[in-house]
Image: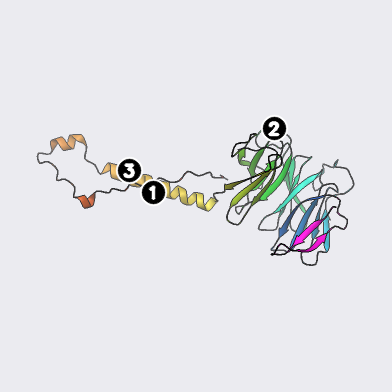
Amino acid sequence: MHRVMIFNAKHEVVGQLNEKLIDPVGLAIDTENRLLYVVDTQADQVVVYDPDSLKELRRIGTPGKNHYLTTPGDFGGASNVAVDKEGNVYVTDTINDRVEIFDADGKFISTFGKNGDGPGYFARPKGIAVDSDGHIWVADAVQNRLQVFNREGQLLTYIGGYGHYPGQFESLVGVAIDKNNRVFTSEQYPGRVQQYRYITDAEAEQLKKEKAAAAGHTTAAASAQPTPAAAAATSTPPTPATPAAISTQPTPAAPATAVVKK
């Protein structure tokens, strides 16, 4: 049965969408503009609904071409959709190995990506999410990599690679990011969800300041120590420091972080 189920906060079914849907596989909701996006992979379309009335508003993409279309704004077996805080819509156009970007009205903006097996390329992009800084996270099921891009399609960083150890993936198909900047990934074959912590741009900047301040403190402390020559020239032995002047606590080191650089 090809449908979208709707639940309330108590996990009770309160409705469903099934009219004119062939194979719905991915969805996202724009809470600001009150729009629900559903990817119908067999129809090669993204269907847009009013989430309150469940009325269909419009469709993005040309239907009925059996995944052959490569024109900007159309899809070849699209898989998933994400929405940023400005209402822009991001769709993984899986067979065409690209990400397409639309505005909140469904107007095509841009696209990036092409087929390849190295970082920055796609083999089967499926899951997609946008973080609080506007970076685009794309899960590739064949490369088993989670790649992070900016709006221009420039690769910022990536994690993963094939394997069953933590931090590796086997058939990576989904990614989601919550309001606490936790990144969740889902893998199809081992049936596994992994969790990561995204360090935001603001947090990264603060960590840099703390590290610089700690380094400055260490340098200042080192320069205050007398040189051996100066000590030898002193006829009177230096007065020992009082216990109160001796710090017994080491300077804390800045934590190791993984940072997405723009």
**As shown in the figure, which amino acid type bears the numbered disc 2?**
Asp
Q: Which residue is mark 1?
A: 213
**As shown in the figure, which amino acid type bears the numbered disc 3?**
Thr
Residue 114 % position (x, y): 73, 37
- Of labels 2 and 1, earlier in sequence is 2
- Quadrant where the C terminus sits is top right
- Front residue (pair 228, 82): 82
Marker disc for residue 140: none
Q: Are marks 1 and 3 in contact (CB under 8 Å)?
A: no
Start-end of magenta stretch: 1-22
Marker disc for residue 117: 2
- Front residue (pair 147, 190): 190
Marker disc for residue 219: 3
Location of residue 220 by image quarter: top left
Q: How is the image coloured?
A: rainbow
Q: Residues within 10 Å of mark 3 (few under 14, many from 20)?
A: few
Q: Residue at x 86, y 54 (%)?
A: 21
Where disc 2 sits, the SS reads: loop
Where disc 3 sits, the SS reads: helix
- Of labels 1 and 3, earlier in sequence is 1
The span from disc 3 to disc 2 (Cα, nearest Å) is 46 Å
Q: Is residue 10 magenta?
A: yes
Residue 61 % position (x, y): 83, 50
Location of residue 169 by image quarter: top right
